[in-house]
Image (cartoon, helix red, strand yellow):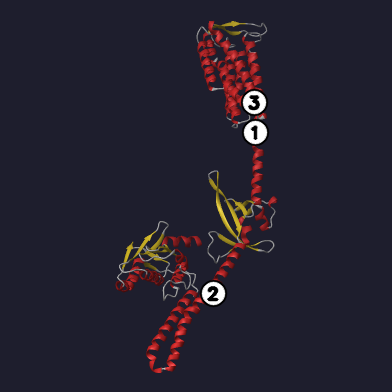
Amino acid sequence: MNFILLITLSIIPLIFCLVTFFGKYTHFRKRITIFLMLLAIWQIDVSILYSNEFFSNSTALIIFRSLRFAPIFQMAIIYFFSMRIMQECLESDQLSQKMISILHWLFNRTIFYILLAYCLFVYAVNFTPYGIQHLTVVKEFPQFPSHYYPVYGPLNFTFTINIYLTFITTMLFLFASLQVKNLPLKRFFISLNVSTIFIFIIGVMSGFLFIPLFFSSLSSLISTCVLFIGYTSVQSRTIEQINRELRDQSAFLEILMNVNPNYLYVRNQKKEIVALNKSFADLHGINPMIFHKTDEIFLMAKQKKWINPMKNCSHDIYEFEDVQGTNHLIEWTCKQINFQGEKNYSLCFGHDVTERMQNEEMIIKSENMRVLGEMAAGIAHEIKNPLTSIKGFIQLLNEDPECNTGYLKIISAEIDRINEVVGELLYMAKPQANTKSNSFFNIMDVIDHVKLLLDTTAIMTNVEIQTAGDPALHLRGFEEKLLKQVLLNIMKNSLEALSKGGKVKIKIERLMDDQIRIRVIDNGIGISREKLKRLGEPFYTTKEKGTGLGLTICHKIMRENNGSLQFKSKLGMGTVVDLIFVSQSNSNNELQTSS
C-alpha cells in the first residue's frame, strides 16, 4: 500500500513535466521539463525501496540501480542550467569585463563534460557490488513501515562525492540566477534553487536515515508544486508582456495610418471595409472610432471614373465629391495582403492628384501656346517666301506680259509649295477619332511596296536598300496607308543622308515584351546630339527645302496608334530609327483590361 501511494505521488512531477513540455513555448521550458522528469524518476526510485511486498530483493535491486541515474545525473544537469544562464547573461552585454572573465572560468563546456563523465562513472559503479552490494530490509522507526535499504560497497564514496558536487553546482546555479536581469525570471530561478536545496537536504537526511525515507517524496512533491506555480506565474507575466507589446504595436500602426495623408482602407473577401485611416474617414464624413464593417460599394458609390486626357497615369483615377461638396481626383491602387498563406485582404490606398492634374493641364496649355507661337512663326516664314516670289513675278508680268510662260511656271510651283505646307498643317491640326483600326496586314508587304517606290531614287543615287526579318509578321490596329506614310518619310530621310555606295537596311522583328519593331538603319553622315533632341519639332529641319513637318507628322501618327518613334545616331557612323508597335496579343490584353 505504501509503495502504491509513493508511486502515485511520484507521478505528480511527471504530470507537471508533460504539462510544461506541451505548454506555451519559453526559452527555458526544456530545462524545467528535464528537471521535473529527473525529479519524478528519482521519487520512483525511492518508491522502489518500499516495494518489499511486491518485488523480490533481486528485482528491486535491478530497478533501483537502473533508476538511480536521476539523482546521479542531476549534478551535471544543474551545472548545464547554470552554464546556459551565463551564456544568456554574457550576450546581454550588461556585465563588467572582470565578471565576464570569472563567468568564463566558472562556466564552460570543459567542466560540463568532466562532470558528465564523472556521472557516467558513478552510474557504472552503481551496477557493481563495489557500488551497491545488495538490498536489506530495515525498519528505522517503529511507527513507520519497513522497507528496503541499499548496502553500499567500497566505492560508494564516489556517490558521496557526487552529492557534494551536486551541492556545489546548486550554489553555482544560485550565483548564476542572481546575475539574471529579468526580474520575473530571476525570481523563478531563485525559487528553483531554493527547491533544489530543500530537496537536497531532505534527500541527504532521509538517505542516511535521520528521517523516514519517504519524506524525500513529500519534499519533492512540495518543491514540484512550488516550481509549477512559479513557472505558470512567469508564463502569465510573459503572456501579459506580449499582449502589452501587441497593443502598443497596434496603437503605433494605427497612428502611422492616421498620420498618412493618403486615403487608406482594408477590405476583406466580402468587399467589406474592416479598417480605415482618418483621411479616408474625413473624406466620407464618418467617425473612425465607432466604425463597423461597411460595404465598400456603399461608401464608394459616389465615385465616378475620371478619364485622364493626358493618359500618363498607370492607375485608375476617380472623381469624388466629399461631404463639403469639394471635388477630388483620387488615384486608387489596391494590393493583396497574404495573411496565413491566403489572400484574404486587400490594402487600398488613394492619392489625391487634383492639384497635380490641374498643374499638368496648365503645363499642357502653356506648351500648346508655345507650340502655336512657333507654328505661327513657321507658317509666316514658309508662306511669306512663296508669296513674295509670287508678288514679284506678278509685277514682272504686268510690266512684260509676253514673258508669262516662265513666270507662270514659277508662280505655279510656289503655289504648290504653299499648298503642301497648308496640307501638312491641316493634317497636324485634324482631330483623330479615338477608335482603333481593325485593319490586319502583312508588314513585309508594306515594306516591299515602299521599297519599290524608292528603288528608282536609290539607283539614281547609287545606294542600296535591303530588307530582313520575319516575312510572316502581321500588324493589327494600325492603318496600312499610315504605316506607308511613316516609312516613306523615314526612308527618304535616310536616302538623303547617304553618299554614293551607302546602304539602308529595314529589319522587322518581334521583341520579348510582345511588341513588333521596324528598324531602319543607314550608314549615312549621322546626326549630332543637339539636332537629335530637336527631331520632331514643328518646322525644325536640316534640309534646304524641307518644311520641318514630316517627322512631326510621323510622331503624331505613331502616338495616336499607341506606337512610338525612337532615334539613335552618331556623327560619321549613321542613324537608327525604331518604330515600335503594340502587337496583336497586347492589343487583346488592353481590350480585356479596359472592359
Give whichever of discs 2 and 1 has the lower sequence position.
Answer: 1
Closest to the camera, between mark 1 and mark 3, is 3
Of the image marks 3 and 2, the number of the one nearer the N terminus: 3
Picture layout, residue 47 above or below residue 340: above
Disc 3 + disc 2, Cβ < 8 Å: no
Q: Is residue 402 above or below residue 199?
A: below
The residue labelled by disc 2 is 373
Above or below, comparing residue 235 to residue 445 in the picture:
above
Which residue is denoted by mark 3 in the rendering? 179
Q: Which residue is mark 1?
A: 238
Q: CA distance from mark 2 to mark 1?
A: 75 Å
Residue type marked 1: Thr
Between label 2 and label 1, give the one nearer the viewer: 2
**Dot 2, crowdedness within 10 Å: few (<14), some or many (≥20)?**
few
Displayed quadrant of residue 140 = top right
Which element carries disc 1, helix, strand or loop? helix
Q: Position of residue 135 (x, y in %)?
A: 55, 7
In x, y percent, where is residue 32?
A: 60, 25
Three-letter amino acid code at the position of disc 3: Gln
Hey, which quadrant is residue 527 in on the image? bottom left
Task: Report the amino acid beneath label 2.
Answer: Gly
Q: Nearer the viewer, mark 3 or mark 2?
A: 2
Q: Horizontal and vertical percent for residue 47?
A: 59, 14
Q: Earlier in the sequence, mark 1 or mark 3?
A: 3
- Element type at mark 2: helix
